[in-house]
Image (spheres, helix red, strand yellow):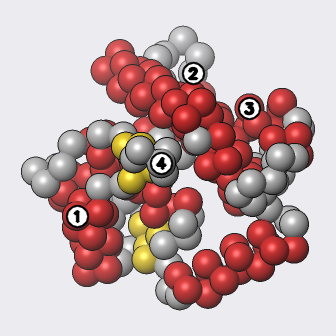
């Protein structure tokens, strides 16, 4: 399930499902990776809805993932939102209605944010989060199964479609997302 656009073009997220995910994270703070959390909640919502909700919560800094891949509730989301608002006010982040928003990011920076959203913060992170093995060093051996590759490509295509839809239907929101990913995840990526 993707966020729906209302008649005014404002994206609407599945509020009840968001509340279910947030409650679960609050009750099990730091106990689950993304895959573990999905396994725990899989009877309550679809994988696509779950992915949209996690993206929403991450984008709004209501949750974070530790170095071990475990999901945590942000200790003080109001403070995180205040920092975001301060960045917006100071011009360090894109803001709604700014006609120069998209011109702030090079094509490479836009591509970095898209790559992060569609690939890096998805299923591939779950594949990467496990323990290292010497078998992975052998280029003659496959490092990923056909089923994993299929899941990775389907998820990436869904996320790319979500971004393309967002860019067309709500460009300000799209550029805010690009800004957010560049500032939070892609600062040290090649530009």
Extreme residue toward the left, this view? 43
What is the secondary structure assignment of the residue under circle 1? helix
Q: How much space separates mark 2 and mark 4, taking CA atoms?
A: 54 Å
Find residue 94 and report its horizontal and vertical position in percent: 78, 57
In the picture of the structure, the residue carrying the numbered disc 1 is 16
- Compared to residue 127, the image places residue 156 above or below, namely above
Find residue 143 and report its horizontal and vertical position in percent: 48, 24
Residue at 25%, 81% (x, y): give it.
Answer: 27
- Compared to residue 38, the image places residue 170 above or below, namely above
Residue at 42%, 67% (x, y): give it.
Answer: 71
Mark 2 or mark 4, whichever is nearer to me: 4
Find residue 174 and report its horizontal and vertical position in percent: 63, 43
What is the secondary structure assignment of the residue under circle 4? loop
What is the secondary structure assignment of the residue under circle 3? helix
Earlier along the polypeptide chain: callout 2 or callout 4? 4
Q: How much space separates mark 4 and mark 1, taking CA atoms?
A: 21 Å
In the picture of the structure, the residue carrying the numbered disc 2 is 138
Q: How much space separates mark 2 and mark 3, taking CA atoms?
A: 30 Å
Mark 1 or mark 3, whichever is nearer to me: 1
Q: Quarter of the image for the C terminus: give it.
A: top right
What is the secondary structure assignment of the residue under circle 2? loop
Mark 2 residue crowding within 10 angstroms, few (<14) / some (14–19) / many (20+): few
In the picture of the structure, the residue carrying the numbered disc 4 is 8
Mark 1 residue crowding within 10 angstroms, few (<14) / some (14–19) / many (20+): few
Q: Is residue 122 left or right of residue 177?
A: left
In the picture of the structure, the residue carrying the numbered disc 3 is 111
Earlier along the polypeptide chain: callout 4 or callout 1? 4
């Amino acid at each position: 399930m993707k966020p729906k656009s209302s008649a005014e073009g404002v994206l609407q997220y599945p509020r009840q499902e968001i509340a279910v995910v947030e409650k679960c994270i609050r009750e099990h703070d730091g106990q689950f990776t993304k895959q573990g959390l999905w396994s725990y909640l899989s009877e309550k919502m679809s994988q696509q809805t779950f992915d949209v909700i996690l993206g929403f919560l991450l984008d709004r800094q209501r949750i974070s993932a530790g170095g071990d891949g475990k999901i945590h509730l942000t200790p003080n989301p109001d403070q995180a939102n205040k920092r975001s608002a301060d960045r917006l006010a100071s011009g360090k982040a894109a803001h709604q209605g700014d006609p120069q928003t998209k011109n702030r990011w090079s094509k490479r920076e836009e591509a970095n944010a898209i790559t992060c959203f569609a690939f890096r913060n998805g299923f591939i992170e779950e594949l990467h989060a496990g323990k290292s093995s010497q078998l992975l060093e052998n280029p003659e051996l496959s490092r990923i199964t056909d089923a994993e590759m299929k899941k990775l490509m389907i998820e990436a295509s869904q996320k790319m479609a979500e971004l393309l839809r967002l860019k067309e239907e709500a460009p300000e929101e799209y550029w805010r997302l690009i800004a957010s990913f560049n500032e939070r995840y892609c600062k040290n990526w090649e530009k």
